[in-house]
Amino acid sequence: MSPVLAADIGGTNLRLAVVNEAGEVVNEQRIEAQLSRADASSPAEAEAQLMQTLISAIHPFAASHEITAIGIGFPGFFDHQNQLLRSSPNIPMLANFPLAAHLSEALNLPVAVENDALCAAIGEQRFGAGQGCDNLLHITLGTGIGGGLILNNAPYGGERGMAMEFGHLCVEPGGRTCGCGNQGCVEAYASATAISRRYQEASGEALSTKAIYQLAQQGDESAKEIIQSAGHYLGMAIAESVKLLDITTISLSGGLCGAWSLLQPAILETLNRQLIPPLQGKIDIRRSQLDDRSGILGAATIARPAREETTGQA
Amino acid sequence: MSPVLAADIGGTNLRLAVVNEAGEVVNEQRIEAQLSRADASSPAEAEAQLMQTLISAIHPFAASHEITAIGIGFPGFFDHQNQLLRSSPNIPMLANFPLAAHLSEALNLPVAVENDALCAAIGEQRFGAGQGCDNLLHITLGTGIGGGLILNNAPYGGERGMAMEFGHLCVEPGGRTCGCGNQGCVEAYASATAISRRYQEASGEALSTKAIYQLAQQGDESAKEIIQSAGHYLGMAIAESVKLLDITTISLSGGLCGAWSLLQPAILETLNRQLIPPLQGKIDIRRSQLDDRSGILGAATIARPAREETTGQA
């Protein structure tokens, strides 16, 4: 029952944690590392840069603990059937790279890799707001908006690991321009980036999202309206997801949940208006209970089956 | 290898067919029967009316053939886990009714029941445009718009049999009012009912949808615009589905496919604009090859496992 190493990889930092069977983080480290490098001139160079960044961060940490497996949440599209990292928005040159196999060889340990938002859903189902649920949609509200889906008690990644592009559901055709190039994506209204921008447009002040959430709780009208509007658009996107998937439990994590007392009612109001009548009032919108640990706990969860396959033990 | 009886049940008529293993319809009958009856004063009365309507239609047809199992596509929500017809838009009084079990007892044959649009998807995967696909979204374009989903080679019904309410995806917030009471559903733009209404608004003429499709193919501007607009809105709704599910193959059946040479390009244009870049150009929009037989062939397909469970034969 030795612990595993879990890694949650972002654009500018790596978070590493030693996690035991019970989901307790027994040691944690954050490392600044520039993952988003568009300077590679070839796929081979991009692969080498990524491998070097990850190995130099993970190796000393893994070596200093009795680790028998590694699980990684990575911001990219994983094709499970072929065990390939199809692509990553952060590293444009990367395509069809067997990341887990290469890392496993370099680190001499079993390595499992999964999309970061799907890892967060796995963590919430195992240890957080989705415990006991066979089906769960988990939404991560950060710089961008991600989604991870558990269906029939299994992570659902889609044909190419590109499922649950929740942040790019279109909630306002012809609306605000999103980072993906399209208009009206929910991410363009409810991500941290969008909320900062909208507050600055409304008030002229450039504030952190945390400050905006606090102002909203204190009754600042502009801040309140923007949080409630974010909730409205999240409700639109959740309604579309529920109409397609017929799932009951939706969990949310990320900074915007700091304004939960404004956010949840706004989500529910729009959601219940948008659903077909037999689904109205049946959907449970939950706040993550894991703070920002759902991703790292999901990465720890995916590490274990990899270790069991290797050692032949259940 | 005896044939099964397949039934496709609509609001005003029942279609019954004897179908062999190869998916060939060896005998077929259409019976006028009023299913949509809102005059029942209690759930018990609604159940009795429904049972009587179905038994009197199915029994003589089943008795005159060597039938060993029955499969039924029904316009309602089926909860598979509990084998209950949760509700049906056509029969408001009905709730939590074990339709398959009661019909099986009355007809003395194994009976399997499934949502009609999911049956159509099952038929397309087994015998039609989705052959060889482990994942398929099938869209039925009729008076309303339905959706059926195959995921990982299995029909996907959701937690309460209410998955794939494709027709009620919102493609134009605040737009046209739909039969469900909401605004901007794709059904309010691209169903046969919507197309007739929109043509009448544009031209003043009340024409059948078939006539409108013909006019569009002949170059009538109003008819063309309405078909292309329907394709645009279908493309919006398909894009949302693909962003959530990451599936490649979408098939469509129903009258509107009669204008395929106008419809498909309009769907693809919007779809590819709305998708995230790595999915653009990767989605295959197919026209059903089964004419209007996908539902009945799906009903025949679900009948077989029920028979095999009963007889213990594979």
Image (spheres, coloured by chain):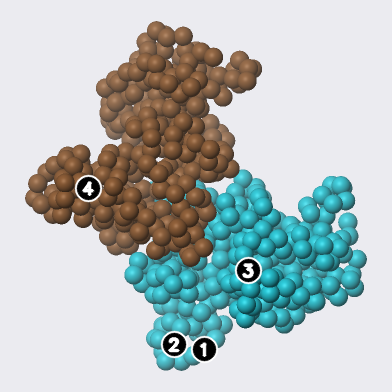
Chain colours: A cyan, B brown
Res. B195 mark: 4
Q: Nearer the viewer, mark 4 or mark 1?
A: 4
To which chain does the residue with label 4 belong? B
For the residues labelled 3 and 2, the Cα–Cα distance comes to: 35 Å
| Residues at marks 1 and 2, CA–CA distance in whole angstroms | 7 Å
Q: Amino acid at mark 3?
A: Leu
Mark 4 lies on a secondary structure that is helix
> Which residue corresponds to mark 3?
A94
> In which chain is the residue bearing label 1?
A
Where is residue B193 drawn, in percent x and y? 23, 44
Residue at 74%, 69% in the rendered image: A7
| In contact (CB < 8 Å): disc 3 and disc 2 | no
Question: Are discs 3 and 4 located on one and the same chain?
Answer: no
User: Residue B77, image x and y in percent?
Assistant: 44, 38
Q: Which mark is residue A200?
A: 2
Q: Identify which residue, B279 or A174, lies in the foreground.
A: B279
Question: Toward the viewer: A156 or A104?
Answer: A104
